[in-house]
Amino acid sequence: MVLGNPAWVLVFVLLSSQMQAGEKALFRDFMGINGHYHFRPELYRPTCSLVRNYHPMPWDIGDDAASTPQLPLSRMKIDGAIVDWEKLYGSWKAAGYRIDASLQFESIKPDRWNDMAGTLQAYGRSFASALGPSSLAALVEAAEIGNEPVDYDDATYRAVFENLARGLREGDPKLKIVTAAAMAKDADKYSKNMASLEGLEDLYDVINVHSYSMIEGWPTWRRVFPEHPDIPYLRVIEDLVK
């Protein structure tokens, strides 16, 4: 479960604890930072041990989802150089982080896929075998299938999820697979209804929930304590757990 807020910091109860029985966790052991490509691991390491990275799939397969991935290299250049995910994620691991990659396909419109099943399964195999726990570098511990796929209806998201998850499982069975933001029922536009993944339980290890302790939305985004009776923060999480 991932509990998030717009301040870019996530409380992670995402990955299985590596502590011994009876050992007490430090705050940094269950806190994480959420970001996109650029952050200073040495600056945040005293406060957290997990990093969730927005990993745009179009960087690896093109905006038309038609290019063959060449992972661990992306096809995207930053400052004139191809992004090498192995070096990037390797630097975070060397700093002591555990890594969750949010594989974001949302910028690819549903009607742009030429061969959705084939492309996603091939990408999943490539990503997991190049960067998963069983790879030589053993960098990425978990991969999310989307973040908040607003433009994908439940049926289309299910197709994306199933094909990408099968590829990830084949590429590295040790890689934990995480759903996009989900709700137990009455999902908002940013989340998927868990009923849409019924029957695919063997293809995911973690259910991802985004819940925000806000009493007002745009433009104030005014925060309140999570237990406030007038917000659904806890109810959304409790319903999903049940």
Image: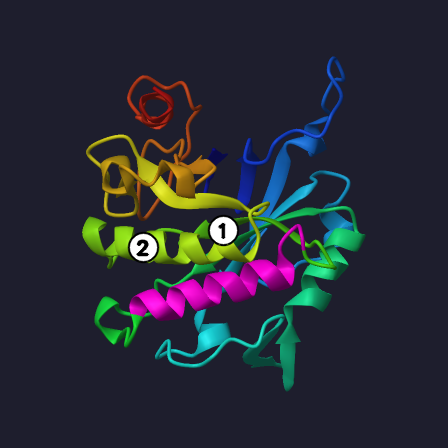
Up/down of 13 relative to 90, above or below: above
Disc 1, SS:
helix
Tell me which segment is drawn in magenta.
116-134
Quarter-of-image position of residue 129: bottom right
Spot occupied by residue 58 in the image (x, y as percentages of width and height): 44, 73
Decide which of tag 1 and tag 2 comes sooner along the chain: 2
- Is residue 107 visible in the rendered structure shown here? no
Q: Which mark is residue 220?
A: none
Q: Nearer the viewer, mark 1 or mark 2?
A: 1
- Is residue 95 visible in the rendered structure shown here? yes
Q: Is residue 28 magenta?
A: no
Foreground residue, 199 or 154? 199
Foreground residue, 41 or 131? 131
Q: Specify the farthest residue to the front.
A: 170
Task: For the C terminus, give its image quadrant.
Answer: top left
Disc 2, SS:
loop
Up/down of 140 relative to 217, above or below: below
| Mark 1 to mark 2 CA distance (whole Å) | 21 Å
Which residue lies at the image location 24% right of the left edge and 67% below the top edge? Answer: 110
- How many neighbours does mark 1 have within 10 angstroms: few (below 14), some (14-19), or many (20 or more)? many
- Residue placed under numbered mark 1 in the picture: 169
Quarter-of-image position of residue 229: top left
The kind of residue on which mark 1 rests is Arg
The kind of residue on which mark 2 rests is Pro
Q: Is residue 122 magenta?
A: yes
- Residue placed under numbered mark 2 in the picture: 149
